[in-house]
Image: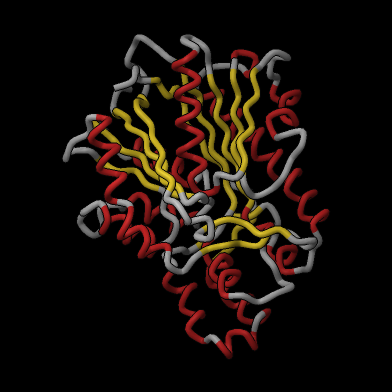
Amino acid sequence: MQEPVSMLSLATAVPPHVLEQDEVARRIRATFGRFFERNPQLCDVFVNSGIDRRYSVRPIDWIEQPHDWSERAAAYLEGAGGLFVTVAASALEQARLDAADIDIVISVTSSGIATPSLEARAGRQLGFRPNVCRVPLFGLGCAGGATGLALATRLARANPGQRVLLVVVELNTLAFRSDRAAKTDVIASALFGDGAAAAVLQTQTDDDAAIRIGDAAEHTWPETLDIMGWTVDPVGLGVVLSRALPRFIEQRLAAPARQFMAAAGLNGSTKFVCHPGGAKVVAAIETALELDTGTLAHERAVLREFGNMSSPTLLFVLKRALESGLSGPVALAAMGPGFTASFLAAEAGHA
């Protein structure tokens, strides 16, 4: 097993606008009335999603209106930049550090494009050193929180004593498409929200961290590029989301999960912290991992209160679990475009 890396802090943040699921469902049915007449079963997706509310960087009236790529990009830069600063500052405060104490900063996003990337845009306001190492990651989707945390752990381990700041930001609501009607668009409108998370990691000799991260691994299934991702056109991003995803997880997740746990030395007492893609996905994970129904309670609670925020969601679940007394060996798991599963081993309960 790899030398553990301490997580010195873990912060989360959401934007100000609340999207109540009942209101979203009412508006979506009004926007795509004829589409729902032809596909009445899709009305159930809002009821069965396991979601009560989500958050957005723009009010629902803005989201409903047509916007081109440039308008969406401007909204992304403003919203993602603000959330980046907010959640990074919170993580730094929890760790009792200044931005100038950070040696490596990793930014993770898939819901918008920023060049210069988010950490460069936020650097002056936060106070990063001119020689800070910047590592922007794009395209990991829902696996981004786990894969970003794994990379942060590896960089901290490879640079003993250096402090690594991981910031994960997604603004999925900006991708809503009122210009077209497709089943995947309706499903996405019932699932996705905006949010951000940040953590500070460092190799340490003491055990005062709430959790320490050990081994990490990924598994990418061949010929699965069409399960999840984005399409791009002049209007904006379009969601790619296969209806076969829950069944795929039920049938295919167990083997790589068992292989990872064996390699990481995790046993049957290990607790799981997973990315909850949706109510059906959570149930599929429990089935695949042979967990009792309802085991992933923190995952369902985060999904209910925040929706699927893509990459930050796993870190929201981890934070809730830690605050609820999570201890002992832990396996973190998330799945995203590729189609890829990302795993981490951890030990909780040191603070």
Image quarter in which the C terminus is found = top left
Residue 79: x and y in percent read 71, 45
Q: Is residue 172 left or right of residue 220?
A: right
Position in image of residue 156 (x %, y %)? 48, 18
Between 9 and 201, which is closer to the camera in this rendering?
201
When the figure is inspected, residue 109 is found, relative to residue 309, above or below; the finding is above
Q: Residue at x 48, y 37 (%)?
A: 147
- Please give the name of the residue rendered at 50% of the width and 26% of the height, measured from the top-left corner: 152
Closest to the observer: 232 or 133? 232
Residue drawn at x 38%, y 63% as measured from the top left: 246
Q: In the rendered image, which quarter is residue 236 located in?
A: bottom right
Judge by depth and name the residue closer to the eye, 332 or 336.
Answer: 336
Quadrant placement of the N terminus: top left
Q: Residue 99 at what x, y percent from top left?
A: 63, 19
Q: Residue furthest left?
A: 268
**For residue 351, side relative to residue 221 (left or right):** left
Q: Is residue 11 left or right of residue 35?
A: left
Residue 325 in sight from this viewpoint? no
* Relative height, residue 70 to residue 206 (above, below): below
The quadrant in which residue 66 appears is bottom right
Q: Position of residue 209 (x, y in %)?
A: 37, 21
Rendered residue at 51%/34% (across/down):
148
